[in-house]
């Protein structure tokens, strides 16, 4: 049985070059399905990993109660000072708590090659903001000088938007800001512009802050900190870890992309399955006489079915691999931006993960199975005498 | 039997295959129509033609509130008929449902948006009740709100003076649109600005964005430029654009995702084309002996080539027209469902591209098989060589 299967399969595979066109259709069809599936989900994966890298479990984010996002939140100077003195916050080198009050506003920048503006986060920060985000480094130019209208821009913004190269000036509320440096952090911070908070407050006519970040002694200090701040009548705040804040933001995006990927993949998979069926029926048709001859000299029906299925599967897997490779070559690490929770752009990179490639191949195999099964049955069932007489 | 009849008869011979092929083409062109409409939208620039309303926002970002003191200056610009302002309230219903609520002056709202209709008594109540709000028909139906109720709405931005973010408004009216298009566009709640301005913690005088109704659409560009020039080099620099561009701006914020989705859907389209092309090629291969017989009967090479090409074209034209035909109402449905944020239209530009694509597709999938059928020699074909 095994030997028979092997023989028939090899016989079939050797004849593929004679039916190159139709066989090619299976490969291209499956490559299309897998490439689209992988690319769409690689986008969701990239967005998720960027935000995940941004949020740390041992940093608490304090917002005004019910604000949901930094942009909506507002805390007065007094409230910010109270929050910074909360228990469980690690001390900095100077004996003061490692805490950073930050102000978030939005500026419109023009994306390279586009005409209308996109919202970009402008974050006014105190020097402690860098201590809380050790991953962030100025890699080009220099740090902004406190008290001056100077900006440093995230690598992602610098690459994707116009008017923010070092030395250029950005006009915000009637005043010019000079870009003096570019920073990298490998996460969503790279989608922002940073400036001195005092200068930003005076330019944007704000008194207070949007949020306070607290470096905790360790993640387990969060519940106690939360209880303490919620019980304090002088402030009305929501407290969560940065990790929770950012992972909450990916949920909607993942759902949307997941639904889109599902619908598009399903439509394409139907088309590819139809193509595979067509191709394999034709393959079986052209080989009808040969298969009948084999049956006549004693080969069983089982090996015929299996051999047709194997041929279909091999073509499908080849297509799937081509598709995954295409998605990887075209999209992996490509930087793009979309709207995040603050109603501002988040720059992230596509991530074609091994898991996505595996899932893509599973889809390819499934389509190959279905595409091969019915034709295989027909091949095994056709009466030997009729097949031999025909053609 | 006529030649047309012959082509059609050939198509109906293998009903399953023809149906599946037609479905593939239909799906491809449905996607094509919608995509092309999105494409047109994304590539469109600022357009002042026929605009009856302008929106003035802070140049730095629409999230930055413009102050109320700009109002008299904007009103004094020639060509400006009515001006209203609107402040984003950040409304949250119950736990976590975000709604679009804006704080406005009731009388000005009515003047700037005559497309929204409501009984005079309700307009009067909206203007005269301090804690009043009105909501659109769709919004009222969705949440079961009735005129006369007190509706609790919280804000994720504005606390009241006592620090509470839970506001309560008197629902004094439910507005509707003047026609079917505007009736679908009734998902916004409006609250009385005077009360909001007085009761919120952050103090008074923040207008948000301004919406301007023009006396004459031809003046749109000129009015926009005049307004922006007036506030240049002040802390409150403005950006004035048409209401439509302002709305599309929201949609364009999704950024590269739109671009990538376009690429991917084009990949879908071309993969489906390949499938269709293969089907037609295959059906020709299977019928080679028949074509030989046709030629034996005296049909010329050109006629046989014509038969095959006509068959391919028939599939593409029927599937393509059905697909584009379906895309047209679907585009309208999407534009309506998104409340003007995604105003795509499968219009004449899209149809022209679609028709060109149908011709191209017919040739691409039909020409090679047709040439093959046209060139075959009778003896070889009949012998199965």
Image (cartoon, grey):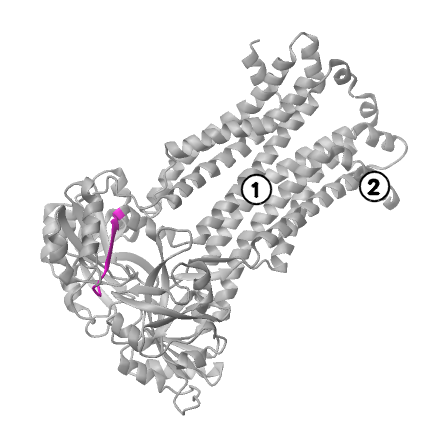
Magenta segment range? Answer: B234-243
Quadrant occupied by the N terminus of chain B: top right
Task: Examine the rendering and report whether any part of residue A175 can be seen.
Answer: yes
Q: Position of residue B300 (x, y in %)?
A: 64, 11
Residue located beneath label 2 in the image: A10
Residue positioned 58% across, 17% down in the render: B7
Residue positioned 14% across, 63% down in the render: B195
- Magenta-colored stretch includes residue B26: no
Horizontal side of A371 relative to A107 (left or right) equals right
In the rendered image, which quarter is residue A158 located in? bottom left
Query: Residue lying farthest bottom?
Result: A95
Relative to A52, say whether B367 is above or below: above
For disc 2, the chain is A
Horizontal side of A303 relative to B372 (left or right) equals right
Horizontal side of A209 relative to A333 (left or right) equals left
Q: Position of residue A37 (x, y in %)?
A: 57, 50
Q: Nearer the viewer, residue B6 or B362?
A: B362
Q: How many marks?
A: 2
Classify mark 2: helix, strand or loop. Answer: helix
Classify mark 1: helix, strand or loop. Answer: helix
Relative to B1, say whether A178 is above or below: below
Quadrant occupied by the C terminus of chain B: top right
Relative to A271, say whether A104 is above or below: below
Q: Position of residue B5 (x, y in %)?
A: 55, 13
Q: Pointer 2: residues within 10 angstroms few (<14), some, or many (20+)?
A: few
Residue positioned 46% across, 49% down in the render: B259
Residue located beneath label 1 in the image: A268
Q: Position of residue A138 (x, y in %)?
A: 46, 74
Q: Nearer the viewer, residue A161 or B92?
A: A161
What label sits on residue B216 in the rendered view?
none
In the rendered image, which quarter is residue A215 located in? bottom left
């Amino acid at each position: 049985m095994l030997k028979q299967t092997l023989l028939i399969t090899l016989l079939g595979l050797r004849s593929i070059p004679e039916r190159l066109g139709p066989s090619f259709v299976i490969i291209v069809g499956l490559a299309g399905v897998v490439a689209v599936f992988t690319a769409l989900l690689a986008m969701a994966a990239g967005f998720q990993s960027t935000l995940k890298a941004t949020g740390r479990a041992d940093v608490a984010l304090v917002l005004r109660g019910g604000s949901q996002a930094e942009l909506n939140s507002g805390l007065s100077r007094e409230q910010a000072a109270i929050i910074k003195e909360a228990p469980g916050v690690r001390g900095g080198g100077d004996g003061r708590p490692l805490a950073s009050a930050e102000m978030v506003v939005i500026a419109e920048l023009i994306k390279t090659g586009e005409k209308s503006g996109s919202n970009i986060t402008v974050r006014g920060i105190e020097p402690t903001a860098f201590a809380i985000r050790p991953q962030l480094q100025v890699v080009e130019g220099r740090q902004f000088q406190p008290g001056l209208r100077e900006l440093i821009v995230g690598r992602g913004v610098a690459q994707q938007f116009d008017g923010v190269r070092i030395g250029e000036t950005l006009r915000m509320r009637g005043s010019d800001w000079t870009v003096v440096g570019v920073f990298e952090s490998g996460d969503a911070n790279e989608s922002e512009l940073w400036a001195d908070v005092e200068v930003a407050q005076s330019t944007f006519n704000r008194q207070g802050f949007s949020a306070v970040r607290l470096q905790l002694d360790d993640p387990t200090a969060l519940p106690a900190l939360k209880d303490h701040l919620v019980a304090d009548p002088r402030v009305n705040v929501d407290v969560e870890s940065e990790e929770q804040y950012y992972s909450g933001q990916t949920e909607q995006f993942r759902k949307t992309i997941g639904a889109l990927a599902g619908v598009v993949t399903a439509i394409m998979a139907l088309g590819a399955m139809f193509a595979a069926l067509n191709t394999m029926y034709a393959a079986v048709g052209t080989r009808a006489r040969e298969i009948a001859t084999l049956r006549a000299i004693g080969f069983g029906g089982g090996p015929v079915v299996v051999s047709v299925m194997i041929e279909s599967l091999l073509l499908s897997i080849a297509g799937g691999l081509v598709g995954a490779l295409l998605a990887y070559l075209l999209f992996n690490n490509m930087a793009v931006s979309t709207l995040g929770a603050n109603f501002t752009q988040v720059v992230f990179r596509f991530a074609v993960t091994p898991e996505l490639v595996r899932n893509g191949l599973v889809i390819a195999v499934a389509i190959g199975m279905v595409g091969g099964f019915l034709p295989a049955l027909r091949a095994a069932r056709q009466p030997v005498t009729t097949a031999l007489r025909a053609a | 039997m006529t030649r047309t009849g012959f082509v059609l008869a050939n198509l109906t011979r293998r009903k399953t295959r023809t149906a599946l092929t037609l479905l593939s083409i239909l799906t491809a062109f449905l996607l094509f129509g919608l995509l092309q409409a999105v494409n047109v939208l994304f590539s469109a620039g600022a357009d002042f033609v026929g605009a009856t309303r302008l929106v003035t926002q802070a140049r730095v970002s629409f999230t930055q509130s413009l102050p109320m003191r700009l109002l008299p200056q904007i009103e004094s610009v020639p060509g400006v008929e009515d001006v209203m302002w609107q402040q984003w309230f950040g409304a949250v219903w119950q736990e976590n449902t975000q709604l679009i609520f804006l704080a406005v002056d009731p009388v000005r709202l009515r003047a700037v948006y005559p497309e929204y209709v409501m009984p005079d008594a309700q307009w009067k109540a909206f203007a005269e009740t301090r804690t009043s709000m009105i909501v659109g028909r769709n919004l009222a139906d969705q949440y079961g709100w009735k005129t006369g109720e007190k509706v609790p709405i919280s804000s994720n931005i504005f606390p009241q003076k006592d620090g509470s973010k839970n506001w309560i408004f008197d629902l004094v009216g439910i507005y509707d649109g003047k026609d079917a298009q505007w009736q679908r566009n009734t998902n916004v709640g409006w609250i009385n600005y005077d009360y909001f301005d007085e009761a919120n913690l952050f103090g008074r005088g923040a207008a948000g964005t301004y919406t301007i109704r023009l006396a004459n659409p031809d003046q749109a560009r000129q009015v926009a430029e005049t307004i922006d020039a007036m506030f240049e080099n002040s802390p409150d620099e403005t950006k004035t654009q048409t209401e439509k561009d302002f709305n599309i701006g929201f949609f364009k914020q999704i950024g590269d995702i739109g671009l990538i989705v376009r690429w991917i859907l084009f990949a879908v389209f071309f993969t489906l084309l390949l499938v269709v092309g293969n089907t037609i090629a295959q059906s020709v291969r299977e019928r080679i002996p028949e074509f030989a017989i046709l030629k034996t009967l005296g049909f010329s090479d050109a006629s046989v080539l014509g038969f095959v090409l006509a068959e391919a074209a028939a599939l593409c034209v029927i599937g393509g027209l059905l697909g584009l035909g379906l895309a047209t109402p679907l585009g309208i449905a999407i534009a309506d469902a998104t409340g003007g944020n995604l105003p795509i239209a499968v219009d004449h530009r899209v149809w022209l591209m679609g028709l060109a694509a149908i011709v191209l597709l017919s040739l691409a999938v039909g020409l090679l098989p047709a040439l093959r059928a046209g060139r075959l020699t009778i003896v070889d074909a009949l012998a199965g060589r």
